[in-house]
Image (spheres, rainbow, N blue to C red):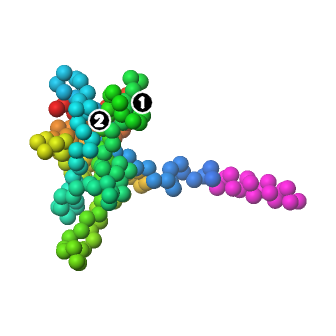
Amino acid sequence: MLRFKLFILLCLLTFVIMSCKRGEYFLDCQVDLFFKVQNADGENILNNYDADSIKIYRVMPDGCLVFVDEKVSIESCSRGFKFWELSSSGSLSLPPVNNPIMQLYLVNQNVHFHGSSESPDFVSGSSFLDVQNCTTYIQWNSQDTDTVYATFTHNKNKHYYDKVYYNGKLIVSSWEDNYEKRSQGIYPVIVK
């Protein structure tokens, strides 16, 4: 009798698990962009930049411009970006050596403060769960700053970047298209 009850319980549990829609209880977020930086001759020039000198700034929902500081960042890329090595097969690995590619986190998840240091008012960044767009500035050095503007789409538990513009030029027309290209080792290219 105990085996029969266990069998019924197992069948019932299996039925419940199988009846749930896939992804219904999981959060799926795609808010970081991978791209190449090349010169006009198609040569990778990320090696020309010192990663420690690159600074990322974000425009917060209240209009404030905030430096993404690794000491206070809650982003997956502590400084708002990360360099990866791109192999000839299109796969990514760490550390970057010969053929770096840049990963840029597109959402302003940092906190910032208003008011005086004695009485700061806490202001949070947008959550990737509700952000509609985000402007990011990449300061490569003291003479060179670029703008990345991204729009986002939300559908139940899926939160993706949709369109991405680099200095006003569309470089990603949709997350789905970019994902398909990335699976083939094709990444957006920034020409500097």
Q: Residue at x 21, y 52 (%)?
A: 57
Labels 2 & 1 near each other (Cβ < 8 A): no
Q: In the drawing, does residue 41 fall left or right of residue 87?
A: left
Specify whether residue 140 is painted magenta.
no
Q: Residue furthest left?
A: 143
36 vs 187, nearest the viewer: 36
Q: Element at badge 1?
A: loop
Looking at the rendered structure, which numbered label has been put on residue 91? 1
Type of residue at label 2?
Answer: Phe
| Magenta stretch: helix, strand or loop mostly | helix
Quarter of the picture containing the C terminus is top left
Residue bearing the label numbered 2: 35
Q: Residue at x 42, y 34 (%)?
A: 93
84 vs 164, nearest the viewer: 84
Q: Residue at x 26, y 49 (%)?
A: 151
Q: Residue furthest bottom?
A: 119
Looking at the rendered structure, which numbered label has been put on residue 49? none
Residue 179: x and y, percent? 37, 36
Q: Which residues are magenta?
A: 1-16
In the picture shown, does residue 87 fall above or below 177? above
